[in-house]
């Protein structure tokens, strides 16, 4: 049975999973990858979940404070060998619970239109499409979503 830990972006297992994530996104994002990559740095991410199966890091996610009520979900990834087993849902739910412990009331996130598996996960998890926010406001290849967590 998978287990999760709460950590920070300094966690080496998280950093290694993010390297794999960036390789996948480089392909999915195509020519838009450099734009997205600039908004996905690991500095100052203090809320990271890493999921383990038999001491092997298999999935991750994080959140950053967006405003006094909202966190932004970042760096969601499950190693391809472990997909389809509910790992992403577990990580996402743990991030939502953790954010609610700090009295945040909603989560937002951005993903690319080409990332259909992620979009399906977020819809299944109760997220709804919202107008693109912040740096994604006029980006046609972005999909932004939101979910109340309290």
Image (cartoon, rainbow, N blue to C red):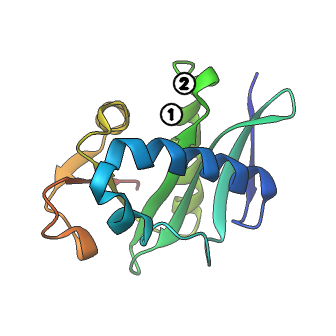
Could you say which is closer to the camera, residue 69 or residue 118?
118
Q: What residue does disc 1 label? A: 89
> With respect to residue 73, does 52 lie above or below?
above
Residue located at (26% from left, 75% from top) = 135
Q: Position of residue 46 (x, y in %)?
A: 66, 71
Could you say which is closer to the camera, residue 104 or residue 24?
24
Q: Which mark is residue 133?
A: none
- Residue, far right: 55
Residue located at (43% from left, 65% from top) = 37
Could you say which is closer to the camera, residue 133 or residue 24?
24
Quarter of image, res 73: bottom left
Q: What residue does disc 2 label? A: 86
Q: Position of residue 92 (x, y in %)?
A: 51, 44
Q: Are marks 1 and 2 in contact (CB under 8 Å)?
A: yes
Q: Secondary structure at mark 1?
A: helix
Point out the image quarter for the C terminus: bottom left
Quarter of image, res 106: bottom left
> With respect to residue 69, does 100 lie above or below?
above
């Amino acid at each position: 049975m998978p287990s999760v830990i709460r950590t920070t972006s300094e966690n080496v297992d998280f950093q290694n999973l993010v390297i794999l994530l960036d390789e996948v996104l480089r392909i999915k994002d195509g020519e838009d990858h450099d734009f997205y990559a600039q908004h996905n740095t690991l500095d100052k991410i203090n809320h990271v979940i890493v999921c383990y199966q038999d001491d092997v890091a298999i999935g991750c996610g994080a959140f950053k404070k967006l405003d006094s009520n909202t966190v932004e979900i970042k760096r969601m990834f499950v190693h391809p060998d472990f997909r389809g087993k509910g790992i992403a849902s577990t990580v996402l739910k743990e991030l939502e619970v953790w954010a609610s412990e700090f009295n945040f009331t909603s989560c937002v996130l951005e993903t690319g239109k080409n990332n259909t598996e992620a979009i399906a996960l977020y819809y299944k998890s109760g997220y709804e499409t919202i107008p693109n926010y912040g740096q994604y406001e006029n980006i046609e290849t972005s999909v932004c979503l939101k979910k109340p967590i309290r």
